[in-house]
Image: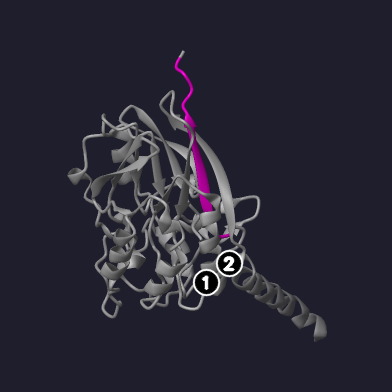
Amino acid sequence: MRARYAVPLGISATAAAGIAYSVGIEARSFRVRRVTVPVLPPGMRPLRVLQVSDIHMVSGQRKKQRWLRSLAGLRPDFVINTGDNLSDPEGIPEVLDALGPLMDFPGAYVFGSNDYYGPRPRNPARYLLEKVQGRHGLNGNPPAVGVVHIQWEDLRDGFDAAGWVNLTNTRGTLKIDGYEIALTGVDDPHIKRDRYAQVAGGPDTNADFSMGVVHAPYLRSLDAFTADGYPLVLAGHTHGGQVCIPFYGALVTNCDLDTDRVKGLSTHEAGGHTSYLHVSAGCGANRYTPFRFACPPEATLLTLTERPARP
């Protein structure tokens, strides 16, 4: 009888230990990843860009807040926030406080679906089922009955007051040591708020450098930015897969991007052009699925350098 229950008990104990690790340890093991991207025109000095994404702040997450404040010590040239700052309608003051030191630097932002709508409890297995069925979370679906509408205007106003550029289906510029950095952004494709037609036309030819910014890296947005000739696109949303298999990688991306590019630096091709794509794994998770496994929370310091000379 004892042997009969040994295997199931062992499996249960292993699963419990894995959940405890993914929630209590890895989800709080914040780190900075460093990436070099050769995209600048000849003659420009390197630029240090800090990308923060998918904070999913829940009121009371003190360790996350301390870590976010500490990122100012990296002294970036500018900051790009690729959305999903919230996982708690009451978390806006804590997001603004945690990002306060970073808002002393030039910056820009787009929003994600969780900046507009509060999360609801859901079965984590649905992410896998949606992958098999070819569906991608909220994409195209109206908010369900009972979804909390967040006072996102307060978050927007806080960013705007600090001088961060709102890239919601629009263009903006940053002045960095005499350089003009042109930024083009769209609202979140995950809930079909993107309006690329409003910003189409390619990089600003009067700027020293141009880049695209979007929350969820859906292929339609990546194709549009790349076909228009943007050398670099920054995105978030995927959480790096959130729960990954060691030595294999992510199972899902929660969008139509392939799992090989679920996080980090890669390239994207469309319309005869090639862009660099950087997808942040983000530093948070939905409050109802607060675990990460083989995919620690992160921010990324991207060093943009001169592109190689053409032969």
**Which numbered disc covers residue 27?**
2
Q: Residue at x 55, y 54 (%)?
A: 73
Q: Is residue 153 above or below residue 48?
A: below
Q: How far, Cα to Cα, is label 2 from label 1?
A: 7 Å
Do we see residue 221 in this rendering? yes
Give the percent coordinates (x, y) of residue 21: 66, 70
Check disc 2 and report its element: helix, strand or loop: helix
Residue 226, quarter of the rendered image: top left
How many tags in the picture? 2
Is residue 98 located in the magenta-colored stretch of the structure? no
Give the percent coordinates (x, y) of residue 170: 23, 48
* Residue at which label 1 appears: 290
Q: Choose between 19 and 304: the one closer to the eye.
A: 304
Residue 81, quarter of the rendered image: bottom left
Work out which residue is located at the far right of the displayed protein and give it. Answer: 2
Bounds of the magenta segment: 296-310
Q: Residue at x 38, y 42 (%)?
A: 233
Label 2 with label 1: CB-CB less than 8 Å: yes
**Which numbered disc covers residue 8?**
none
